[in-house]
Image: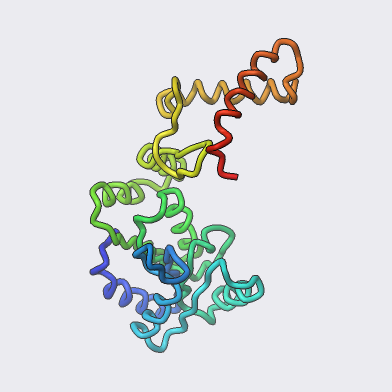
Amino acid sequence: MVDTGYRKKAYDFIKKEVAAGRQAYVICPMVEASEMIEAENVVDYTAALKEALPGISIEYLHGKMKGKEKNSIMERFASGEISVLVSTTVVEVGVNVPNATVMMIENAERFGLAQLHQLRGRVGRGKYQSYCILVNGSDQDGTKERLDILNRSNDGFFIASEDLKLRGPGDIFGIRQSGEMEFKLGDIFTDANLLKTVSEEVKHIFSEDPDLEKEENTELSRKLSEYLEKSYDRLNL
């Protein structure tokens, strides 16, 4: 993990890897510049990177591109025609380019740890030594400590668990993607085993009585309907 002042060294390293015949990804959190959010975007970043690394084939990829165009870019990258691919998280899964050895992630603080773990899994898929460079663009307290979890483990389950503890799971009903769940009695961390047991029991009940029409489920059906009625105004559908 590095700060933004390390970019020149990172570019020099990418240049060195490309000279050795390897390829690199650069991940940005946004497609285009925004007045609301200060973060790197693939369009402007690609233009700046082409100036910083002249003579190297650099292209960008993002989810707003048409399917045919995205496929063409990925095919050219996979074939080695493109040396550096600047992309959003659209390459997070389902991409296999064994020759890519560098993953540089800008504004790493804007991604969840589990997502960063998925992204760095795009490199190291071949026989060559791979590298993941996390660029931290924030000076907020706790950001460095959170990202450092990735340095301590390659276990995806452990990383996801730590991310859940730090960020919170957000709402089941509502739009928050982080923060504490509003459970009245249970705790998602200390009562994890109990919640798992409850989940399995719920699946069993609904497999036996999907509409909760049996006499023994009458009160459960009433309570569930009452709860949902109170929660409808918070649903994000």
Is residue 30 shown to the viewer in this render?
Answer: yes
Q: Tell me: 52 left or right of 92.
A: left
| Residue situated in front as seen by the camera: 40 or 146 | 40
Q: Position of residue 64 (x, y in %)?
A: 57, 69
> Which residue occupies 53% across, 38% down?
234
Which residue shows up at 29% across the image and 71% down it?
A: 7
Up-down: is 62 above or below 119?
below
**Percent of width and height locating residue 173:** 53, 36
Above or below 85: residue 92: above
**Number of numbered discs overlaid on the protein picture:** 0
Q: Nearer the viewer, residue 19 or 143?
A: 143
Q: Nearer the viewer, residue 136 or 130?
A: 136
Q: Quadrant of the N terminus?
A: bottom left
Q: Is residue 131 shown to the viewer in this render?
A: no
Q: Quadrant of residue 77?
A: bottom right
Left or right position of 175 against 144: right
Q: Quadrant of residue 189?
A: top left
Q: How is the image coloured?
A: rainbow
Hey, which residue is sitting farthest bottom in the picture?
55
Q: Quadrant of residue 216?
A: top right
Quick one: quadrant of the C terminus? Answer: top right
Q: Residue furthest top?
A: 216
Q: Is residue 227 above or below residue 41?
A: above
